[in-house]
Image (spheres, rainbow, N blue to C red):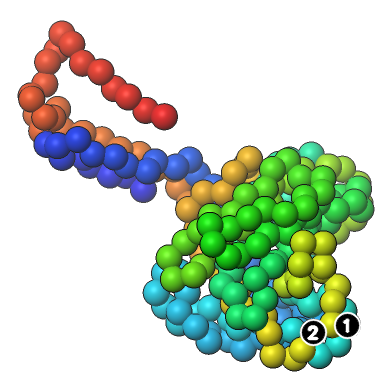
Amino acid sequence: ETLTFRSTISSKLLLEAARTNVARESEGLTNGPYWGLSGSSLVADNNASPDGLITADKFLESATTAEHEVHQTITAFVADSTVHAFSVFFKANGRTWIYLQARRKDNTYASVYVNCTGAGTVGTATNTVSASVQQCASNWYRATLVFNTLTGVADVTLWCQTANADGGKSYAGDGASGGWFWGVVCEAGAFSTSYIKTVGGSVTRSADIVTSLLTSLEGGFSAATGTLYAD
Protein backbone atom coordinates (compact mmCIF):
# COMPACT_ATOMS: atom_id res chain seq x y z
CA GLU A 1 0.00 0.00 0.00
CA THR A 2 1.27 3.49 -0.87
CA LEU A 3 0.29 6.39 1.41
CA THR A 4 0.70 10.10 0.81
CA PHE A 5 1.46 11.83 4.11
CA ARG A 6 0.18 15.44 4.30
CA SER A 7 -0.02 15.95 8.05
CA THR A 8 1.10 19.29 9.47
CA ILE A 9 1.35 17.93 13.05
CA SER A 10 3.42 15.21 14.68
CA SER A 11 2.01 11.85 13.56
CA LYS A 12 2.83 8.14 13.55
CA LEU A 13 2.31 5.52 10.87
CA LEU A 14 2.62 1.73 10.98
CA LEU A 15 4.67 0.68 7.95
CA GLU A 16 5.08 -3.03 7.31
CA ALA A 17 7.11 -5.11 4.90
CA ALA A 18 5.49 -7.49 2.43
CA ARG A 19 4.26 -10.70 4.06
CA THR A 20 2.39 -13.78 2.80
CA ASN A 21 -0.18 -15.72 4.82
CA VAL A 22 0.06 -19.39 3.82
CA ALA A 23 -2.74 -20.56 6.14
CA ARG A 24 -5.72 -20.96 3.82
CA GLU A 25 -9.26 -20.05 4.91
CA SER A 26 -7.96 -17.92 7.76
CA GLU A 27 -11.50 -17.21 8.96
CA GLY A 28 -13.29 -20.30 7.62
CA LEU A 29 -12.18 -23.02 10.02
CA THR A 30 -15.30 -25.01 9.13
CA ASN A 31 -13.98 -25.42 5.57
CA GLY A 32 -13.27 -29.16 5.34
CA PRO A 33 -10.87 -29.20 2.37
CA TYR A 34 -8.39 -27.11 4.36
CA TRP A 35 -9.12 -27.69 8.04
CA GLY A 36 -9.53 -30.92 9.98
CA LEU A 37 -11.08 -31.46 13.42
CA SER A 38 -10.55 -33.87 16.29
CA GLY A 39 -12.36 -33.97 19.61
CA SER A 40 -14.31 -30.85 18.72
CA SER A 41 -16.94 -29.23 16.54
CA LEU A 42 -17.35 -25.79 14.97
CA VAL A 43 -20.27 -23.42 14.39
CA ALA A 44 -19.51 -21.08 11.49
CA ASP A 45 -19.84 -17.29 11.74
CA ASN A 46 -21.16 -17.34 15.29
CA ASN A 47 -19.73 -14.19 16.87
CA ALA A 48 -18.29 -10.77 16.08
CA SER A 49 -14.62 -11.07 15.16
CA PRO A 50 -11.91 -8.51 15.98
CA ASP A 51 -12.77 -6.62 12.77
CA GLY A 52 -16.42 -6.28 13.88
CA LEU A 53 -17.93 -8.69 11.35
CA ILE A 54 -19.82 -11.86 12.31
CA THR A 55 -17.14 -14.23 11.01
CA ALA A 56 -15.73 -15.87 14.16
CA ASP A 57 -16.27 -19.63 14.32
CA LYS A 58 -17.41 -21.09 17.64
CA PHE A 59 -15.17 -23.94 18.81
CA LEU A 60 -16.82 -26.57 21.03
CA GLU A 61 -14.91 -29.34 22.79
CA SER A 62 -16.41 -32.82 22.69
CA ALA A 63 -17.55 -34.61 25.86
CA THR A 64 -14.60 -37.00 25.71
CA THR A 65 -11.11 -37.22 27.20
CA ALA A 66 -8.95 -36.20 24.27
CA GLU A 67 -7.15 -33.34 22.58
CA HIS A 68 -9.70 -30.86 21.26
CA GLU A 69 -8.31 -29.25 18.14
CA VAL A 70 -8.54 -27.93 14.60
CA HIS A 71 -5.58 -28.29 12.24
CA GLN A 72 -4.24 -27.54 8.75
CA THR A 73 -1.26 -28.90 6.80
CA ILE A 74 0.84 -26.26 4.99
CA THR A 75 3.88 -28.28 3.83
CA ALA A 76 3.67 -27.20 0.18
CA PHE A 77 3.90 -23.53 1.10
CA VAL A 78 6.92 -23.40 3.43
CA ALA A 79 10.62 -23.77 2.68
CA ASP A 80 13.19 -25.72 4.66
CA SER A 81 14.85 -24.07 7.65
CA THR A 82 12.79 -20.89 7.60
CA VAL A 83 11.34 -19.04 10.57
CA HIS A 84 7.56 -18.61 10.54
CA ALA A 85 5.15 -16.75 12.83
CA PHE A 86 1.93 -18.73 13.43
CA SER A 87 -0.80 -16.67 15.08
CA VAL A 88 -4.50 -16.88 15.84
CA PHE A 89 -7.12 -14.74 17.57
CA PHE A 90 -9.08 -16.39 20.40
CA LYS A 91 -11.97 -15.38 22.64
CA ALA A 92 -12.76 -17.59 25.63
CA ASN A 93 -16.07 -19.34 26.28
CA GLY A 94 -15.48 -21.64 29.24
CA ARG A 95 -11.83 -22.33 28.37
CA THR A 96 -9.22 -19.62 28.81
CA TRP A 97 -6.12 -21.66 27.96
CA ILE A 98 -5.22 -22.45 24.36
CA TYR A 99 -2.41 -24.51 22.87
CA LEU A 100 -0.70 -23.73 19.56
CA GLN A 101 1.44 -26.42 17.96
CA ALA A 102 3.42 -26.70 14.73
CA ARG A 103 4.91 -29.92 13.41
CA ARG A 104 8.26 -29.24 11.79
CA LYS A 105 9.82 -30.99 8.79
CA ASP A 106 12.03 -33.20 10.98
CA ASN A 107 8.84 -34.53 12.69
CA THR A 108 9.45 -32.64 15.92
CA TYR A 109 7.03 -30.10 17.36
CA ALA A 110 7.10 -26.48 18.44
CA SER A 111 4.33 -25.48 20.83
CA VAL A 112 3.11 -22.98 23.40
CA TYR A 113 0.33 -22.68 25.97
CA VAL A 114 -1.34 -19.27 26.27
CA ASN A 115 -3.74 -18.03 28.95
CA CYS A 116 -6.33 -15.65 27.47
CA THR A 117 -7.37 -13.72 30.57
CA GLY A 118 -6.29 -10.36 31.96
CA ALA A 119 -3.36 -9.03 29.98
CA GLY A 120 -2.68 -12.54 28.64
CA THR A 121 0.08 -14.90 29.76
CA VAL A 122 2.48 -17.16 27.89
CA GLY A 123 2.80 -20.54 29.56
CA THR A 124 5.00 -23.52 28.74
CA ALA A 125 6.79 -23.18 25.40
CA THR A 126 8.71 -25.96 23.62
CA ASN A 127 11.10 -25.67 20.64
CA THR A 128 9.97 -22.12 19.90
CA VAL A 129 11.97 -19.23 18.50
CA SER A 130 9.64 -17.05 20.57
CA ALA A 131 6.03 -16.87 21.77
CA SER A 132 3.76 -14.00 22.75
CA VAL A 133 0.18 -12.93 23.42
CA GLN A 134 -1.49 -9.59 22.75
CA GLN A 135 -4.66 -8.45 24.50
CA CYS A 136 -7.15 -6.99 22.00
CA ALA A 137 -10.52 -5.29 22.28
CA SER A 138 -13.75 -7.08 23.30
CA ASN A 139 -11.96 -9.89 25.18
CA TRP A 140 -10.06 -11.09 22.13
CA TYR A 141 -6.42 -12.17 22.31
CA ARG A 142 -3.85 -12.79 19.60
CA ALA A 143 -1.43 -15.61 20.40
CA THR A 144 1.76 -16.10 18.36
CA LEU A 145 4.11 -19.08 18.07
CA VAL A 146 7.34 -18.44 16.14
CA PHE A 147 9.09 -21.62 14.95
CA ASN A 148 11.71 -22.89 12.50
CA THR A 149 10.50 -25.35 9.87
CA LEU A 150 13.86 -27.25 9.90
CA THR A 151 14.43 -29.96 7.26
CA GLY A 152 12.99 -33.40 6.58
CA VAL A 153 9.99 -35.09 5.00
CA ALA A 154 7.30 -34.67 7.67
CA ASP A 155 4.22 -32.60 6.86
CA VAL A 156 4.28 -29.11 8.39
CA THR A 157 0.97 -28.86 10.23
CA LEU A 158 -0.59 -26.18 12.44
CA TRP A 159 -2.87 -26.95 15.40
CA CYS A 160 -5.20 -24.63 17.33
CA GLN A 161 -6.48 -26.26 20.52
CA THR A 162 -8.15 -25.46 23.80
CA ALA A 163 -6.55 -26.61 27.05
CA ASN A 164 -7.73 -26.86 30.65
CA ALA A 165 -4.45 -25.57 32.16
CA ASP A 166 -0.83 -24.87 31.34
CA GLY A 167 0.28 -28.31 30.14
CA GLY A 168 -3.28 -29.63 29.85
CA LYS A 169 -3.81 -30.19 26.14
CA SER A 170 -5.59 -33.53 26.66
CA TYR A 171 -8.49 -33.38 29.09
CA ALA A 172 -12.08 -34.43 29.72
CA GLY A 173 -14.28 -32.08 27.72
CA ASP A 174 -17.80 -31.17 28.80
CA GLY A 175 -19.35 -30.83 25.35
CA ALA A 176 -20.16 -27.15 25.83
CA SER A 177 -16.98 -25.19 26.62
CA GLY A 178 -14.43 -23.78 24.22
CA GLY A 179 -14.26 -20.37 22.61
CA TRP A 180 -13.98 -18.63 19.26
CA PHE A 181 -11.02 -18.94 16.88
CA TRP A 182 -10.48 -16.45 14.08
CA GLY A 183 -7.82 -15.04 11.80
CA VAL A 184 -5.17 -17.74 11.50
CA VAL A 185 -1.92 -16.48 9.99
CA CYS A 186 1.31 -18.30 9.18
CA GLU A 187 3.88 -15.94 7.67
CA ALA A 188 7.62 -16.18 7.06
CA GLY A 189 9.30 -13.93 9.62
CA ALA A 190 10.32 -13.68 13.25
CA PHE A 191 7.15 -11.89 14.43
CA SER A 192 3.49 -11.44 13.53
CA THR A 193 2.35 -8.50 11.45
CA SER A 194 -1.10 -7.09 10.75
CA TYR A 195 -3.76 -9.67 9.95
CA ILE A 196 -3.86 -10.96 6.34
CA LYS A 197 -7.15 -12.60 5.31
CA THR A 198 -7.08 -15.67 3.07
CA VAL A 199 -9.80 -17.73 1.42
CA GLY A 200 -8.88 -20.59 -0.92
CA GLY A 201 -5.17 -19.81 -1.22
CA SER A 202 -2.29 -17.85 0.22
CA VAL A 203 -2.39 -14.04 0.11
CA THR A 204 0.49 -11.57 -0.03
CA ARG A 205 0.24 -8.10 1.45
CA SER A 206 2.42 -5.61 -0.40
CA ALA A 207 4.98 -3.57 1.49
CA ASP A 208 3.73 -0.23 2.82
CA ILE A 209 5.28 2.82 1.17
CA VAL A 210 4.85 6.35 2.45
CA THR A 211 5.48 9.61 0.61
CA SER A 212 5.35 13.15 1.94
CA LEU A 213 4.75 16.47 0.26
CA LEU A 214 7.69 18.56 1.41
CA THR A 215 5.62 21.73 1.37
CA SER A 216 3.21 20.20 3.91
CA LEU A 217 5.78 19.49 6.60
CA GLU A 218 5.27 21.25 9.89
CA GLY A 219 7.41 24.40 9.99
CA GLY A 220 8.08 24.22 6.27
CA PHE A 221 10.83 22.47 4.34
CA SER A 222 14.50 23.31 4.74
CA ALA A 223 17.01 22.17 2.12
CA ALA A 224 19.80 22.62 4.67
CA THR A 225 18.57 20.85 7.83
CA GLY A 226 16.14 18.17 8.87
CA THR A 227 15.70 14.94 10.84
CA LEU A 228 13.88 11.72 10.07
CA TYR A 229 13.22 9.36 13.00
CA ALA A 230 12.11 5.73 12.60
CA ASP A 231 12.06 2.66 14.85
Q: Is residue 58 above or below residue 151?
A: below
Residue at image point 15% right, 8% down: 224
Q: Is residue 57 above or below residue 195?
A: below
Q: Residue 226 location, x and y as percent?
A: 21, 16
- Extreme residue in the top direction: 224
Q: Is residue 112 above or below residue 33?
A: above
Answer with left or right where residue 94 lies relative to residue 150.
left
The answer to whether the residue labelled 2 contacts the one labelled 1, judged by CB atoms less than 8 Å apart, is yes
Quadrant of residue 90 within the rendered picture: bottom right
Which amino acid, mark 2? Gly
Which amino acid, mark 1? Thr
Q: Residue 53 location, x and y as percent?
A: 41, 78
Residue at image point 76% right, 45% down: 128
Q: Which residue is mark 2?
A: 173
Q: Which residue is mark 1?
A: 65
Residue at image point 47% right, 74% down: 49
Q: Quadrant of the C terminus?
A: top left
Disc 2 element: loop
Query: Is any part of residue 176 visible from this angle?
Result: yes
